[in-house]
Amino acid sequence: MPRAILASFAKRLAIPDLRWSPDEGLTVSRLRIELLSGLTVALALVPEAVAFAFVAGVHPLVGLYAAFLVGLITALIGGRPGMISGATGALAVVMVALVAQHGVEYLFATVVLMGILQVIAGAMHWGRFIRLVPHPVMLGFVNGLAIVIFLAQMGQFKVPGTMENTGHGMSGGEWLSGLQLYTMLGLVGLTMAVIWVMPRVTRVIPAPLAGIVVVAALVIGFGLNVPRVGDLASIEGGLPMFHIPMVPLNWETFEIILPYAVILAAIGLIESLLTLNLVGEITGKRGGASQECIAQGVSNVATGFFGGMGGCAMIGQSMINVKSGGRTRIAGIAAAMFLLIFILFAAPLIEQIPLAALVGVMFMVVIGTFAWNSFNIMRKVPLTDAFVIVLVTVVTVMEDLAVAVVVGVIVSALAYAWNNAKRIHSITRESETEKGAKVYEIQGPLFFGSSEGFLEVFDVSGDPETVIIDFAASRVVDQSALQAIENIAGKYESAGKRVMLRHLSRDCHKLLNKAGHLMVDSDDDPDYELAVDYSVRTGILGGH
């Protein structure tokens, strides 16, 4: 026994796999693919980080530093090589109210606390609860996020500098028109065409990178008048500097930042773990949830101390990386380092890249991310599952990812409970071992949803003096089930009759024995080696 306990403890403390290339050797070809994939991701990160910084009401460099630090640390120690993390819109829309009311220093303190909570979640292995997310919720998440990514690109079709931060995010703005709009649309279409054609010609260069290079060369070479990255904001800056958030270290500050930190930590982990599952399905990998939670937490703690707005996994950039061939930690590290190079040395060049090229890349991400087969799936699965897919998609678009996932899981759980509640019934027969006794063979699980149906199967007044309730085809699950057993036993007791329980499985036997309902304690019945009939004590859970 001690050896088994030590083995279990050692397993929990097992050193995570932090190899840069876990599945294959680091060849020149693999290194080229990873570096080019990282460059593509870095280019796509720039406008996203700047835009989300504007949404949160902070300086663009706050978003860029977050993209660099969160991306670098999660790439180094995260649970799924190939995933990309950075500043995200899902977090930015929560941050905007905090920044508007208390200032950016409180945001940095909140991000530090958010990271600490995520590290705790990882250390406690809470990441495994992502397994409770049903597949219809995953489909709704993917579809909703694809729509959110698509809608986020609409802001690039507005005249730069005309959108305003209302305290609830960016809104308003003047739409492009005339030749400038048509040129932008044409360049977006050209980028998408290059990305679609490139894999059929060569895979030496990632298709998204080829699309960006071709369109950027066309715009710069002909001097086309379309919005560019530099029109959003300057990305030039220095190295992020260590900075302790300048907030009072007292209980009042803690009360201000704790609610935001909890919400941000939950949203960040949910989006990261769902993205981890999605990337895992594409790359054929499993596990790493707890390690990813810790990586996200460490990255956010560091980001808060270096003037960043925090972040989480980014499904759009992760899809760009995976579709470009990125499979190791090198791509994520390269993306972060390229982003830092852009900030320090290459800002004037990067600011010349047309937004149309990056919008085209994101549109292709939307097409590749959206689960188009869900339309066919919804015609074949139960109506409840189809409803959950649509519900999660809509809530993701209208509210946010965390709310959508929670709503989807709750609806799925309620539907599952209702379906199981309807299964409870009994088969009655005369006892072969107790002369004159009646046996109720319970079919289906006994839990809170089926407890009322369980009580309805019995005929207390018409039954003989001895009744045997056989649980061979049932399970006693929760306190509601215990209460139902006690209630029915109390009714028979009031009528001067006796109730016996038979064929309890080991878990049911343990549950009933712990509650104090069993008047006979035996380890034989759970293994069905000897059919022991248990009398039931009543009055334990508050009468009947």
Image: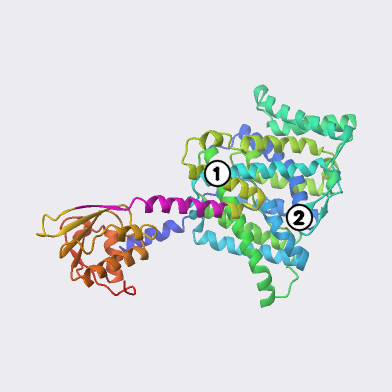
Crowd rating for badge 1 (residues with CA inside 10 Å; few <14, some 14–19, many 20+): many
Q: Which residues are magenta?
A: 405-428
- Residue at 51% of width from left, 44% of height from top? 136
- Residue at 54% of width from left, 61% of height from top? 121
Q: Are marks 2 and 1 in contact (CB under 8 Å)?
A: no
Q: Position of residue 53 (x, y in %)?
A: 76, 54
Q: Is residue 410 magenta?
A: yes
The residue mark sitting in front, 2 or 1, is 1
N-terminal-most mark, 2 or 1: 2
From the viewer's perspective, tell me whether residue 182 is left or right of residue 73: right
From the viewer's perspective, tell me whether residue 272 is left or right of residue 173: left
- Residue at 69% of width from left, 43% of height from top? 149
Q: Could you tell me which secondary element the residue under label 1 belongs to?
A: helix
**Most common secondary structure along the magenta stretch:** helix
- Residue 159 versus residue 492 in the image, above or below: above
Residue type pointed to by label 2: Gly
- Residue 236 versus residue 371 in the image, above or below: below
- Residue at 30% of width from left, 59% of height from top? 456
Q: Is residue 425 magenta?
A: yes
Residue 169 - label: 2
Q: CA distance from mark 2 to mark 1?
A: 27 Å
Q: Position of residue 19 (x, y in %)?
A: 55, 46
Q: Residue furthest top?
A: 201
User: Residue beneath label 1, please?
Assistant: 389
Residue type pointed to by label 1: Ile
